[in-house]
Amino acid sequence: MKQVVQNYKSGELALLDVPVPGCKPGGVLVRTAYSLISTGTELMKVSEAGMSMLGKARSRPDQVAKVVQSVATNGVPATYRKVMGKLDSYTPLGYSLCGVVEQVGAGVDDVKVGDLVACAGNEHALHAELNWVPKNLYAPVPDGLAPRDAAFGTVGSIAMQGVRQGESRLGEVALVIGLGLIGQLVAQLLTASGVRVVGADPDPARCELAERLGAAACGDPASPAVESAVAELTDGHGVDQVYLAAGGGSNQPVELAARLCRDRGRVVDIGKCRLDLPWNAYYEKELDVRFSRSYGPGRYDPEYELEGRDYPIGYVRWTERRNLACFLDLVARGRVDVGPLISHTAAFDDAVETYRRLEDGELKAVAVLFRYPEQADGAGASAAAPTVSVPAVRRGGRASAPVRSARTPVRLAFVGAGNYASSMLLPHLARRDGVELSTVVTTTALSAANAQRKFGFAGATTDLDAVLGDESVDAVFVVTRHSSHADLTRKALLAGKAVFVEKPLALTGEELTGVLAAVEESGNDRLQVGFNRRFAPLLRQAEQRFGPRTGPASLRYLVNAGRLDQGSWYLRQDTEGSRFAGEGGHFIDTASRLLGADPVSVYAVAASGNEDLQVLLGYPDGSTATIGYVTTGAAGFPKETLDLVADGKVLQLDDFVRTSVYDGRKRWVSSRLPKARDKGQSAELAAFVRAVRTGGPMPVPLESLVATTAATLAVRASLACGAPVPLAEAR
């Protein structure tokens, strides 16, 4: 495997091939997805390595003192050999990463192979493809948190421990001096705690960033702006705490802290800055000076870090590991936003060049990440790129679907009658000849009664079992919240009903497998998922104009989804899945329809701090489809735009209002511009009702519905591992 190392004597940086570490008891072997460069601590170490021997001595007087002591004890020759041997060795870099558990050591039972974890420690969370990490130096990553963001866990823990040392309270005012990576995180944590923050940094860009992320005011410490902001926010009393997150040899930070802190305030040192305390200033205010020791209690204790001996929570509430887990939770819940702090993401293979650019000042950055390949050395199975299984469709020995007379109405039951059912489905069915709306089932009696009155259902009930047991009902529509789709579909299939379920069919692989188990058990495969866009008249018309393909195609689909209102049930990701899990199947199915196949791979990347996604789908013939799903676009921009390029031709779809096909110099534009967008619901419902009536094939093959659902689920898997996910049919 590869690892970033440095020779402290020569200053040489290298990406070195080293053996894979063993998985010892009491820890886990982790394959790195992202690791974070500490632009403060690590660059200081890199810079020191490039100094002369005299410069190294001046920068580390603590080490010089050890050398002097060694000379007194062991003599000059032995000390020289020891020192030079240590200097002329490769040392590791890095201490904050996120990766996937590849192997679990004896005595570890809180994670398993394939779990995503954030790791800490300058001996264990290194810039390396694989790391062995002891139990108390990793924490599981919460569901939905991207690996890139989880890689901030260690530096977040450092910032959190500093805030804890300050003992901030709701409504207080704090001054953060130094708005680098740690300072930015300290400011966000304080803001999340209800503390108003003033920031001080000579870099205007960092000041602007801190204000954008919640600080009340920021400015150059040498200007009057910081002092004025403190006076205004505190009525002239001074701040309650000062957090020193600056580095360097200037004594300005501790002097500024004394000037702007209130009487008996607290000064917390987090960074490594000069601390020549002006005695009079600190004495007169009786300032409480505190130090923050790295990630929290447990740091530098080998029994805690290496042997896994935890401190009882009743005596030590916040340990290193609990700080790490707490910070990850805050990021996952959106209380801390690390995305805007990322200045650059570099491929791990470019590590040496990235350090050079940082040291030379060519790359100005708050935070820089290394992104790792899914499998670099071929050793072992790559946990960072799991294969998502597409469950095989197995049909039992079912009786043929009934064929009805054209004069016999198809009797439909609805489970759920919410906004989508009432606006996009029932209006088409209520006026369709040959359809009888039999029964509507809802969880509340009033909503069932409203749907019965509005659309003419023969009956209304809250008893699902009664409807499923009604032999006169031909088909059941499942139009409920996402979390119930799979279970209701499974029950309806087992009852022998044809089923139309709104997307998504399932939110997990287990749910999808359960639906297919019902198909196999019952022999009933009469299933349609509400992927209506493939039935849109304009899209079908453009397909015909475009004609058949002879070579691979490139498809781009931009979905300007927009923001949801606060309180929308779509935001309940813990129960209803992410927004993309809920509706992403629409866009994957449309792409697959246009490309004439089901996807074989999925690679997803998420924007930080919101739900924006880029999803790249690979297809068997080499075609690709990129789905940009964004929530941060302009409300006036079209919701859906699509381009398909192949064989010297281009198909464009403009929000289901207009389509165009370019073929050489010729251009065809759709002749009709509908006043209302037709996204295919009416045609899809007609096809479903026809299939139920005639006993013919369902509008979309079950295998394709399963493949689209599996691809939608694979987006989450790809986000978790930070790598492409192959889709393989289960055998």
Image (spheres, rainbow, N blue to C red):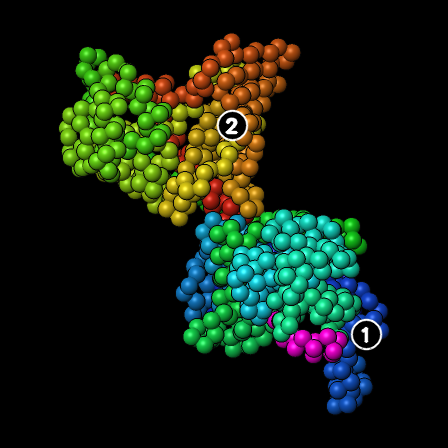
Note whether 269 is above or below 363 in the view shown.
Answer: below
Q: Look at the picture and state if 613 lies above or below 525.
A: below
Picture coordinates of residue 541, whole percent (x, y): 47, 14
Q: Is residue 155 at least partly visible in the picture?
A: no
In terms of depth relative to the viewer, which is nearer, 532 or 703? 532
Q: Which residue is mark 1?
A: 58
Position of residue 6 in the picture relative to residue 330 (left or right): right
Q: Disc 2 or 1, which lies upstream in sequence? A: 1
Q: Residue at x 43, y 30 (%)?
A: 586
Amino acid type assigned to the residue bearing label 1 in the image: Arg
Label 2 crowd bin: few (<14), some (14–19), many (20+), radius 10 Å: some
**Does the magenta segment cover residue 291?**
yes
Disc number at residue 639? 2
Dot 2 amino acid type: Lys
Q: Is residue 41 above or below residue 626?
A: below
User: How far from the left and from the top, in percent, is residue 543?
Assistant: 49, 17
Q: Using residue 527 as the reference point, say whether residue 164 is left or right of it.
A: right
The magenta stretch is: 277-292
